[in-house]
Amino acid sequence: METTAKDRTEIESRKVSSGKRRLIGDRGSHFLKRMEGETGANIAACYQCERCTNACPVSFYMDVKPHQVIRFVQLGWREELLRSATIWVCLSCEMCTTYCPNEVAVAETILHLRSLAAQSTIAPREKQLAVFHQTFLDELQRFGRVNEAWLMAALNLKPGILKEKMRSGQLKTEIELGLTLWRKGKLKLLPKRCEAIKEIRDLYRNRQGDRS
Ligand code: SF4
Ligand code: SF4
């Protein structure tokens, strides 16, 4: 894959913490092929028009913008992606995928990177969001669907979460929101088990196996 002038400028301007210049990943094409194989996304088709980033409602909070995520995959910059805040900040709303003129599955790519990060030993940039991600998957396996009240209870029991929420005032906001939802009958206190729970657990296990 050819490196454009824009990429060269970007590569020149990025430095690793040691102060050395950041080089294109030696295994760039290997990582690109792997990502395309695992997501079914045609990542090589991206021509950096940035429509995905312009459509993203939370790109302001991302350290690596959606169009850059795709470019980094093309360049094989796996570690930078797994260390980014972006993979945890993404809402999976799929606006980026919808607006891409080349049908690059940007949202799916980011979601897959999040799963790779969760499986890796790399410390997540957004710790609370990473814990939320794992708790969500645990609850999904438990009942085959997610009950919001049980999800938040399970999340709050994770080390450090409740303390941080109390410190930031987030706990008070969540309790008020929970009460409002409960009064309106939108919050079920008892979880219901999904009939297809076995299939969901098998699917999850197979996905885990694919990545190991
Ligand atoms: S919208 Fe599609 S082609 Fe444009 S930068 Fe994003 S992924 Fe690439
Ligand atoms: S899926 Fe993620 S990256 Fe894409 S538009 Fe939504 S928040 Fe942004």
Image: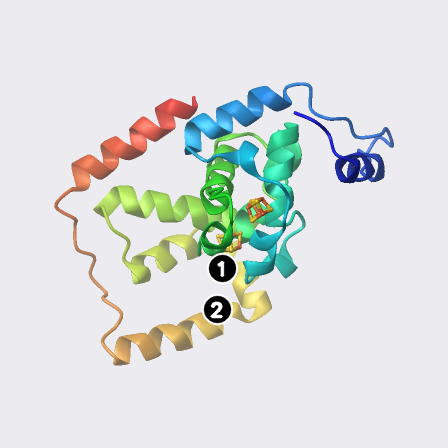
- Element at label 2: helix
Residue density around tag 2, few if under 14, some if 14–19, many if 20 or more, within 10 Å: some
List the residue tagged with mark 2.
171
Q: In the displayed orientation, state which residue is furthest to the front.
A: 101
Based on the displayed image, in which of its 4 quarters is residue 211 positioned? top left
In this orientation, which residue lies closer to the viewer: 121 or 80?
80
The percent position of residue 162, horizontal first and vertical second, equals 49, 59
In this orientation, which residue lies closer to the viewer: 121 or 53?
53
Q: In the displayed orientation, state which residue is furthest to the right.
A: 19
List the residue tagged with mark 1.
162
What residue is rendered at 48% in x and 74% in y?
172
Is disc 1's CB within 8 Å of ligand 2?
Answer: no
- Element at label 1: helix
Task: Report the quarter where the N terminus lies.
Answer: top right
Residue type marked 2: Leu
What residue is rendered at 53% in x and 30% in y?
120
Lateral position of residue 169 relative to residue 210, left or right: right
**Is the residue under label 1 in contact with that under label 2 (CB below 8 Å)?**
yes
The percent position of residue 113, horizontal first and vertical second, equals 51, 37
The percent position of residue 54, horizontal first and vertical second, equals 60, 59
What residue is rendered at 63% in x and 53% in y?
62
The percent position of residue 157, horizontal first and vertical second, equals 42, 53
> Which numbered circle lies on residue 8?
none
Residue type marked 1: Leu
Task: Report the quarter where the C terminus lies.
Answer: top left
Going from the N terminus, do you reach mark 2 or mark 1 first?
1
Is residue 126 among the parts visible in the rendering? Answer: no
Vertical order, 190 against 65 (above or below): below
Is residue 61 among the parts visible in the rendering? Answer: yes
